[in-house]
Image (cartoon, rainbow, N blue to C red):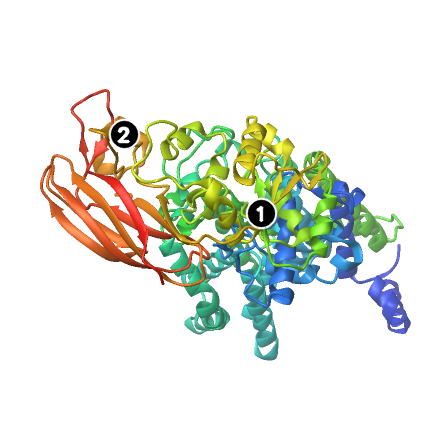
């Protein structure tokens, strides 16, 4: 048994030897280096599908994986080719385009990907980002946990569970969801923030600056992390105000957080936050909070065996370790840290349960109706944009991982005491080496047992090969400015809309389709192909109900339906459509729309239309050039606000449909009508403004009402009508070029519609329109 003096002498020799070792040997002994290497190893094991298919196919490519590839393509294209703001694109949803402020664009990741695309390709870059994001999340969580606990091995174990013991990560990895690609910024923010709160002077300043930079980075990745960071920061400020500290200490803590948050808000409010607030206010279709129940966690997931929680082994060790720690009276700061993160984890767990409690997963329509804390948040302005309360699980795992690190630190410390006592009893062992070995084995067992199921499940991920069509490489060589129209216009069948979106990274041409996070259900009312004539028919294809509603096969309509033999080619040329692309696999998968698409092609391009390119992936038709229309003006029925055309006394008319909702009509609750305006589209296929004269009759139903007419949102005429009165409308309009969208003539009435007496006719009537005529009056 070594005497105390001998042990001290031996330790002094080790320290002296350390000072003589080369710097690279000191680096090799650094816990941070081994933590980073361990993070890379765990990411490689978990993400082995991406690693083994690095350049062969994107993991999760059949869902969101190729959307991430498109994100990188668009950031590069917008910044370096088009020199424009990447938060807006008209390369999708052409020609109007769409805002990307609420899309998981991750522009910072796109910037990081810039040098990798030419070196390893777009597919390998996308997969590599998946792998690196997981490794960086482990490492940054390790830095935060180590800074709080002071124990490397316990912190690494907690960081591993924080990153991988998460069934949401399965969805991110297997489906290629973009929001987890930048998760590592969140623990890195906490690392810098809590160091800034603990230190003074220059150390406090530089760590506060690091927290500020992390907030700025999160603005360019995913705003959900900003929400988490803001809530945690406010929560910690409140916690500090309620704990036993001097008011001077409390003031310093709150001031430091206010400086970090204030500096961030001052920079991002005008260019980023203010436009987002305005966009959320002006576009109610962005609000998807009603989907929160479907995306919430079930209470059972926290307790059952499976992938819904980090596992019972970790929970048992956490409890045992914290009990041991509490018995040994931790410092005041540690007690506060443990208490804060325990409360935070419980609050976050309650938020993941959504607005209404449900007991079991996969019971989306079977909630208990019991309100949960999230019900206080999800209808608030801006927060109603969110739809995924389950993402608060990240905060829960932060607290769980940190508490586990504290618990494991105490268990490892107790192990060291036991081994030291063994040494006193006469057992000669190298206690430091043995302690490291045994602790490492225990940590490995904890990680293996806790993450085994998650790692196995990650092996079921699929790498979807890009299978780039050769035709698009030909288009990439053509530098002319034109668009392509792909059929079906929107689909999740066949290759999937994400893949067609990613094809744009090859050909670089604007396209009418798209699939972005906030318009998966095509709820955006400004979608061009859902509204504009001809394109709308390509959108419907085989939707016979909609075709018959707006293109009646018998009886005619209340206006002269545009003659496609006359306007089709000039219209396509006007919107720079060079090719119409058919995807046979997707058309067949969407209910046999291939035949309908072929009929539309021959109807528009002529009976003798032949493909200019064809393979097993696509069929391409060239849109021929045609002379512009002699008269560039024409009118068509809009997509909203009309019942089917009908004839009375040889006069064809349409009743306005202010509800546009079958549910409202069936329930007869006309008070729920939202006064949908009845639309007439006016096209001007020129580059100059033209004068137009429009005439039509408006007739009222059985109650007095006011009919209001607007043109492109500006009031044009208004009249109060008695029951049964007819108003002969004549308007002279100045029609702008329809370069991005046709002009819209809208009719509406503030009074509620009236149900019919016939119980078999569920329509709700207000006013009708007949005999619509347009005449061009020149420039």
Mark 1 highlights which residue? Answer: 397
As drawn, is 641 to the left or to the right of 325?
A: left
The percent position of residue 600, horizontal first and vertical second, equals 53, 35
As drawn, is 91 to the left or to the right of 731?
A: right
Instruction: Measure how far apart labels 1 and 2 are at the Cα level.
Output: 61 Å
The percent position of residue 99, horizontal first and vertical second, equals 48, 56
- Position of residue 365 relative to residue 450, above or below, is above
Mark 1 and mark 2 in contact? Answer it, CB < 8 Å: no
Q: Residue at x 38, y 39 (%)?
A: 561
As drawn, is 279 to the left or to the right of 722?
A: right
Mark 2 highlights which residue? Answer: 646
Q: Looking at the image, which is closer to me, 231 or 335?
A: 231
Q: Residue at x 27, y 37 (%)?
A: 657
- Seen as rendered, the residue at the extreme bottom is 201
The reply to whether residue 691 is in sight is yes
The reply to whether residue 350 is in sight is no
Element marked by disc 1: helix
Q: How many numbered discs, if any? A: 2
In the picture, residue 717 is in which quadrant? bottom left
Element marked by disc 2: strand
The percent position of residue 52, horizontal first and vertical second, equals 80, 42
- Say which label, 1 or 2, has the lower sequence index: 1
Q: Nearer the viewer, mark 1 or mark 2?
A: 2
């Amino acid at each position: 048994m070594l005497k105390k003096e001998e042990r001290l002498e031996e330790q002094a020799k080790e320290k002296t030897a350390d000072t003589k070792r080369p710097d690279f040997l000191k680096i090799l002994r650094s816990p941070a280096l081994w933590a980073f290497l361990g993070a890379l190893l765990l990411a490689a094991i978990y993400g082995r599908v991406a690693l083994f298919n690095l350049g062969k196919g994107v993991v999760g490519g059949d869902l969101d994986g190729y959307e991430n590839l498109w994100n990188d393509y668009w950031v590069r294209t917008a910044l370096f080719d088009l020199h424009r703001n990447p938060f807006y694109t008209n390369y999708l949803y052409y020609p109007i385009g769409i805002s990307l402020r609420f899309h998981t664009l991750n522009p910072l990741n796109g910037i990081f990907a810039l040098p990798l695309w030419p070196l390893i390709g777009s597919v390998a870059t996308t997969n590599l980002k998946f792998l690196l994001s997981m490794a960086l999340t482990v490492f940054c969580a390790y830095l935060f946990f180590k800074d709080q606990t002071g124990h490397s091995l316990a912190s690494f174990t907690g960081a591993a569970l924080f990153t991988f013991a998460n069934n949401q990560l399965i969805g991110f990895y297997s489906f290629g969801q973009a929001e987890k690609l930048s998760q590592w910024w969140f623990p890195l923010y906490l690392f810098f923030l809590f160091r800034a709160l603990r230190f003074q002077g220059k150390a406090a300043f530089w760590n506060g600056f690091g927290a500020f930079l992390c907030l700025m980075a999160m603005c360019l990745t995913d705003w959900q992390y900003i929400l988490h960071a803001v809530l945690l920061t406010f929560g910690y400020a409140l916690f500090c105000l309620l704990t036993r500290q001097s008011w001077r200490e409390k003031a310093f803590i709150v001031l430091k957080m206010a400086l970090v948050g204030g500096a961030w808000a001052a920079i991002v409010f005008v260019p980023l936050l203010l436009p987002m607030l305005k966009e959320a206010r002006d576009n109610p279709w962005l609000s998807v909070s009603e989907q929160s129940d479907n995306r919430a966690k079930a209470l059972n997931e926290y307790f059952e065996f499976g992938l819904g929680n980090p596992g019972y082994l970790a929970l048992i060790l956490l409890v045992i370790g914290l009990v041991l720690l509490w018995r040994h009276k931790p410092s005041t700061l540690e007690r506060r840290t443990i208490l804060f993160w325990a409360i935070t984890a419980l609050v976050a767990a309650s938020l993941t349960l959504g607005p209404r409690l449900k007991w079991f997963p996969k019971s989306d329509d079977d909630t208990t109706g019991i309100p949960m804390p999230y019900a206080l948040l999800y209808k608030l302005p801006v927060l109603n944009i969110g739809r995924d309360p389950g993402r608060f699980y990240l905060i829960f795992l932060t607290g769980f991982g940190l508490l586990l690190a504290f618990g494991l630190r105490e268990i490892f410390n107790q192990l060291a005491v036991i081994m030291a006592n063994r040494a006193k009893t006469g057992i000669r062992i190298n206690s430091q080496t043995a302690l490291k070995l045994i602790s490492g084995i225990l940590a490995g067992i904890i990680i293996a047992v806790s993450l085994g199921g998650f790692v196995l499940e990650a092996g079921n991920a699929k790498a979807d090969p890009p299978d780039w069509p050769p035709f698009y490489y030909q288009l990439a060589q053509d530098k002319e400015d034109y668009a392509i129209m792909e059929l079906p216009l929107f689909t999740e069948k066949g290759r999937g809309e994400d893949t067609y979106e990613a094809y744009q990274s090859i050909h670089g041409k604007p396209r009418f389709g798209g699939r972005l996070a906030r318009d998966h259900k095509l709820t955006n009312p400004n979608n061009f192909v859902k509204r504009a004539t001809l394109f709308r028919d390509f959108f419907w294809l085989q939707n016979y109900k909609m075709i018959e509603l707006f293109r009646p096969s018998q009886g005619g309509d209340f206006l002269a339906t545009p003659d496609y033999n006359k306007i089709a080619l000039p219209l396509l040329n006007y919107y720079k459509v060079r090719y119409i692309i058919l995807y046979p696999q997707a058309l067949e998968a969407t209910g046999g729309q291939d035949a309908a698409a072929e009929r539309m092609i021959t109807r528009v391009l002529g009976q003798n239309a032949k493909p200019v390119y064809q393979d097993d992936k696509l069929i391409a038709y060239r849109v021929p050039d045609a002379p512009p229309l002699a008269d560039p003006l024409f009118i068509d029925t809009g997509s909203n606000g009309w019942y089917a055309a009908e004839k009375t006394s040889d006069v064809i008319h349409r009743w306005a449909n202010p509800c546009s909702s079958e549910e409202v009509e069936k329930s007869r609750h006309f008070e729920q009508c939202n006064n949908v305006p009845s639309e007439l589209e006016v096209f001007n296929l020129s580059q100059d403004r033209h004068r137009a004269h429009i005439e039509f009759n408006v007739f009222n139903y059985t109650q007095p009402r006011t009919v209001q007419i607007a043109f492109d949102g500006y009031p044009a005429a208004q009249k109060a009508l008695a029951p049964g009165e007819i108003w002969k409308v004549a308007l002279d309009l100045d029609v702008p070029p329809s370069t991005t969208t046709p002009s819209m003539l809208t009719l509406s009435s503030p009074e509620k519609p009236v149900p019919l007496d016939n119980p078999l006719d569920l329509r709700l009537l207000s006013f009708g329109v007949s005999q619509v005529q347009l005449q061009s009056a020149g420039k």
